[in-house]
Image (cartoon, rainbow, N blue to C red):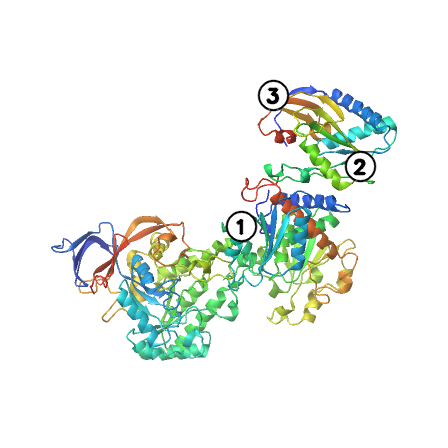
Amino acid sequence: MIVLIKGARLLGAEPTDLLLRDGVIAEIGSGLDGTGATVIDAGGLVALPGLVDLHTHLREPGREDAETIASGTRAAALGGFTAVHAMANTDPVADTAGVVEQVWRLGREIGYADVRPVGAVTVGLDGQRLAELGAMADSAAGVRVFSDDGRCVADALLMRRALEYVKAFGGVIAQHAQEPRLTEGAQMNESELSGRLGLRGWPRVAEEAIIARDVMLAAHVGSRLHICHLSTRGSVEIVRLAKQRGLPVTAEVTPHHLLLTEDLVAGYDARYKVNPPLRSADDVAAVREGLADGTIDAVATDHAPHPVEDKECEWDAAAFGMLGLETALSVVQHTMVDTGLLDWAGVADRMSFAPGRIGKCDGGDFAQARPLAAGEPANVVLVDPSASRTVDPAASVSLSRNNPYEGRKLPGSVVATFLRGFPVVENGELTQSSIQKGMR
Amino acid sequence: MSRDLSGFRPVLSDDEIARALTRMAHEVVERSKGASDLVVLGIPSRGVPLAQRLARSISSVEDIDVPVGAIDVTMYRDDLRLRPARALEPTDIPTGGVDGKIVVLVDDVLYSGRTIRAALTALDDVGRPQAVRLAVLVDRGHRELPIRADHVGKNLPTSVRESVKVLVEEVDGRDAVLIGAAEDPVAHVDLEDAR
Amino acid sequence: MIRHLLSSSDLTREQATTILDTAEEMARLTEGRSVKKLPTLRGRTVVNLFFEDSTRTRTSFELAAKRLSADVINFSAKGSSVSKGESLKDTALTLAAMGADAVVVRHSASGAPYRLADSGWIDANVLNAGDGTHEHPTQALLDAFTMRHHLGDLDGRHIVIVGDVLHGRVARSNVSLLATLGARVTVVAPPTLLPLGVEHWPCEVSYDLDAALPGASAVMMLRVQQERMNAAFFPSAREYSRRYGLDTQRFGRLSDDAIVLHPGPMNRGMEITAEVADSERSVIVEQVTNGVYVRMAVLYLMLAGAGDGTTGQEGAA
């Protein structure tokens, strides 16, 4: 299949043409010859490398009522993602080579986005014994990111061992930083508002204390450390300090922590219940600054689908988590690009190159997060920054509806997503995936 | 309740009201053969000051203290659900109660009769009087229930398209009975209470 | 005039005063009468929906509704809430199908009454009878009613609230209502039992009971649960009662007309000694009686008027 994209602005620069052929970018330049090619007029559109999400909950196996690998990767494609890292807190937990290979294969077969399984750090996410990290790394899934996400690896010794152990195969521990004793029964950010609403507080220090500890541990053993979804000004400051010292620490922030604040909790609508919780406007400002100056390396969605009954209930009983794949790029445009904090090249870095580097999926047969250059895999997303939409949860292809942006007007839209040269999204709509059309 | 009374014309002056009350006081005494068993209860809001004046008047005629109080009928109304809930007016039953007494209910305007029906039910829960009589300053007709007043200050034939306003010194700063066009001639239950 | 009563902080001074005035009339209309029942809410259905046991509160609401001639249904949903039984939604739909006009809800989860009121599952009036560690507005109203009865207008009065403010819905509701009514409120507790940000509440905060008592017109002692000890909120019951309990000695330092309140149930010997609880200036039993009047007033103001011509919490009549 040959596709000629005419007049796209590469990472927001001057318009040029891209010729995609046999799954790679064949040529870049103006006035390319489109003989035999499907021509796409990309006037006014920005071309970005396919986005890479470091933090996605696909729920399969175990909670196929909330999301499946098929529905989740379709949502990813619509959001401009060509690769997602599927978190390990499934049922069974992705703590063996068997489970991660199954997830990886399903992703391949469905073909809307590459699925990179994340392996659990400890068996059953129990925080007691290391899972077989090496076996998962050596499996067909080639796992490089390990996380007990949803739970914190709270035991300092176990964390130290995990950090050390994954050095053998270039892995990274992605820590869900949450001191468990300080957050027993926690429901929302601990603040004047939590006191007023009578909801148990989730103090910032519970996140910051673990990040500080793990940064020191990583420094001590000389390992890579990745911080999941950091949410506070203090966390940004700790990571900034670590980077100033040259430590190999990376961090991600979610779209919702870039936009939403705790006051949304006031009506007890559980759509706004998430872990870590929504924080204050000051924290939002801090994570935006951190993302802009590179302290925070990546935006990761923490896409967390939940069925209606797990959200349509008492706040205390509701599940933590929000959808994010289909809205992430719009939220980033709204909070970072339209505010002048980041240009499109910056977005490409925070949403593709950096997560690709952290997840070690930027090389090999199915390389992601590569530069937009001739000879590179044709993972490309076309974005219309001038579009805008009012978010309608019912319009989502996710199986779940826990969308915190309902009714909000957000800028930008994903017009097309190419996975290795094949358009999985065209004119803002899913096509039949390449596998179903017999294309690879 | 602030009211725009432009367009209203007087029907009774302050002097006429005073004379009507004095006459009613005499009638009450005559009818009850004295004042020893009387209890006078006003229906809030404007029935209450009228009841007090009537009781004073009876007291001066008979030279004994006539117990006077108030009975709020809000909780007993049959039209509660036709409008938002209202704050209650005080109920004040004189010590000695109403059992075996002759209760004189006092209201400013008698119209549909529903307020008086509610007052009779309310009175039921307070005790068992020997007799209940009704004194009103103005009877404007249009009864919806078989109720009539025993003592009337003035019979005032009206149209349902009209509104009768009673002003009393204690509440409104002056005494007068006025008549004018009703704001909403259909909802006449409201008119009776738009005092 | 009131659509829902979810939180005492939603009440304006005018609304709160109307409720208290109405409660006074309720007291006058029923006290010392042979017929205590009023026909006002005949044909209306009030559901007591209790996800958490509280015989005192349920009985008080039941009596209040019955005195107004409403039909009362007690719907005990204990154990079916957070523990994945019948959901709040299904319960609400059931009650809606039964034709409930008002739902009095008690729940262990903060905000559950908000879910019920805002969900669209049921259009009944919702009355919060205590939700988690959030609020208990009718308790605050009955406390204010009791104080007003003894002290007159609460404007400028100094009221001291002592005990577990962190987990206590009574404290939250009382602080906001008393502040709305113009009182000067001081909350006293060990720092561990005060929520973060309490300095932004409309009250003063003290860790020292002895310093707070002089000049107080009323002292409200809150129940402190023994199990808090195990969670390291304070070292021992003895230490707590020594520092924060109302004993005879501290009681003696109060001015002669000051009153003592407790929402009950009391831990005698812990936050309050038996002598103080049983003293003449303790109005604890009166609080129970007043609870019925206040709840009658709220039910009346919610239900007696036109169905739903009014939306939201509108100004007093």
> Percent position (x, y) of residue A345?
28, 58
Q: Position of residue A288 (x, y in %)?
A: 39, 58
Residue C72 vs residue B138, the one in the foreground: C72
| 1 vs 3, front mark | 1
Q: Position of residue C124 (x, y in %)?
A: 55, 48
The amino acid beneath tag 2 is Pro
In which image quadrant can residue C168 be found? bottom right
Instruction: Determine the residue located farthest toward the right in the rendered image.
Output: B63
User: For the residue labelled by badge 1, is the local secondary structure a helix, a strand or a loop?
Assistant: helix
Image quadrant where residue A348 sits: bottom left
Visible residue check, residue A167: no
| Label drawn at residue B129 | 2
Could you give the CA–CA distance between mark 2 and mark 3, rounded to whole angstroms?
42 Å
The residue type indicated by label 1 comes to: Ala
Chain ID of residue with mark 2: B
Tell me which label, 2 or 3, sits earlier in the chain: 3
Q: Position of residue B181 (x, y in %)?
A: 60, 22
Say whether marks 2 and 3 touch (CB < 8 Å).
no
Q: Residue at x 50, y 55 (%)?
A: C89
Chain ID at mark 3 = B
Task: Choose top left, top right, bottom left or bottom right for residue A59.
Answer: bottom left
Instruction: Point out which mark residue B7 bears.
Output: 3
In this rendering, the label closer to the viewer, 2 or 3: 2
